Each structure stands twice: as C-alpha cells, then as structure tokens.
Image (cartoon, rainbow, N blue to C red):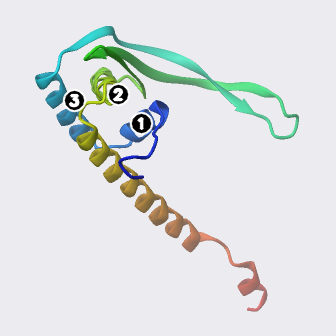
Amino acid sequence: MNEHTSLSREDLNDILQHADDKEVHALATMIRTETEVRPLQHPTSQTLLVPVHDPISGNSFYGGEMLATAAVVEVAGKNGWAMVMDDNAELALDIATVDGAWAAGLYHKEIHALLLKTAVERVRKQQQDGSRTADTKVKFDQMAGS
C-alpha cells in the first residue's frame, strides 16, 4: 500500500479496527484539536444479523447476531463514518473522525502511516499464526512410514 493507492472507505474502516486503539485515539484527538469535527450521529450500539452463505445449496441464511457500534461525524464539511465490533463508542467516534479527515483530504500522511503500520503488522501476525498452525498439522505421509 503506497500513499497514492486508492483505498476504499470500507478498507480504511477495516484496517483501523485492527490498529492499536491508543494510536487511533491519538490521531483522532489531533484531528479534533486542529479541525472542526461535528457529531452527526452519536455512537449507537446495535445488533446486526450476520448472513452466512451455504456453499452446498448456494443459499444464504442468518447464522447469528453481532454487536456493533456505529457513529457518523462531519470533518471539514465531509462525513466520516465507522462501524466497529462490540460496544465501543470511543473507537467508533475515533474511526469516524479519521474517516472524515481522509474524505476531506486532511491528514493523509498521518493516516497513511497508521494504515501502513497496521497492515504490515496484520500480515506479520497472519504469517506467524499460519506458521503456528502449520506446526500442528498431522503429517500422514510421515505417519505411514513409521
């Protein structure tokens, strides 16, 4: 991901949910201190039905519910939105603030730095988790030879 890569707002929201909460909060606080941020929808917790695709029938069904918190703010005339897992009003407001700044063309360098750091950390963690999983796989070909 480079600074000129087109990034969807959904991707921005997803990556920021995996960022360090304190870093997201610090960035959102800086934006709120230096730019006018106006809440349009205060954080609201709600349950969402989670659709699941059945690969056999090709149909979808609802596999359960998920708790999420959504918030909408206005940053320099642009709307920022976030929906985060669980009941986390502060994180929803922080991510909405960062999203609004991104939409307004503000703080791209700072936001991009946090996104890049988080994306690299996610890949590293996924590789580490994959390595741990690979170590636990049963090696049937080796068992047959014993």
Which residue position is annotated with label 1?
12
Confirm or deny contact between disc 2 and disc 1 (CB under 8 A): yes
Which residue position is annotated with label 3?
28
Q: Quarter-wise, where is residue 87 in the image? A: top left
Q: Relative to residue 100, is residue 26 depicted above or below?
A: below
Q: Quarter-wise, where is residue 82 in the image? A: top left
Counting residues from the start of the chain, the first of labels 3 and 1 encountered is 1
- Return the x and y of residue 77 as percentages of the image width and height: 29, 13
Q: In whole angstroms, how far apart are the C-alphas of marks 3 and 1?
A: 14 Å
Q: In whole angstroms, how far apart are the C-alphas of marks 3 and 2?
A: 9 Å
Q: In whole angstroms, how far apart are the C-alphas of marks 2 and 1?
A: 7 Å
Decide: few, some or many residues near mark 3? Use Cα within 10 Å; few <14, some 14-19, many ≥20. many
Q: Is residue 75 left or right of residue 118?
A: left
Q: Amino acid at mark 1?
A: Leu
Q: Secondary structure at mark 1?
A: helix
Q: Disc number at residue 53?
A: none
Which residue position is annotated with label 2?
99
Q: Amino acid at mark 2?
A: Asp
Confirm or deny contact between disc 3 and disc 1 (CB under 8 A): no
Q: Relative to residue 135, is residue 130 depicted above or below?
A: above
- Return the x and y of residue 107 as percentages of the image width and height: 23, 35
Counting residues from the start of the chain, the first of labels 3 and 2 encountered is 3
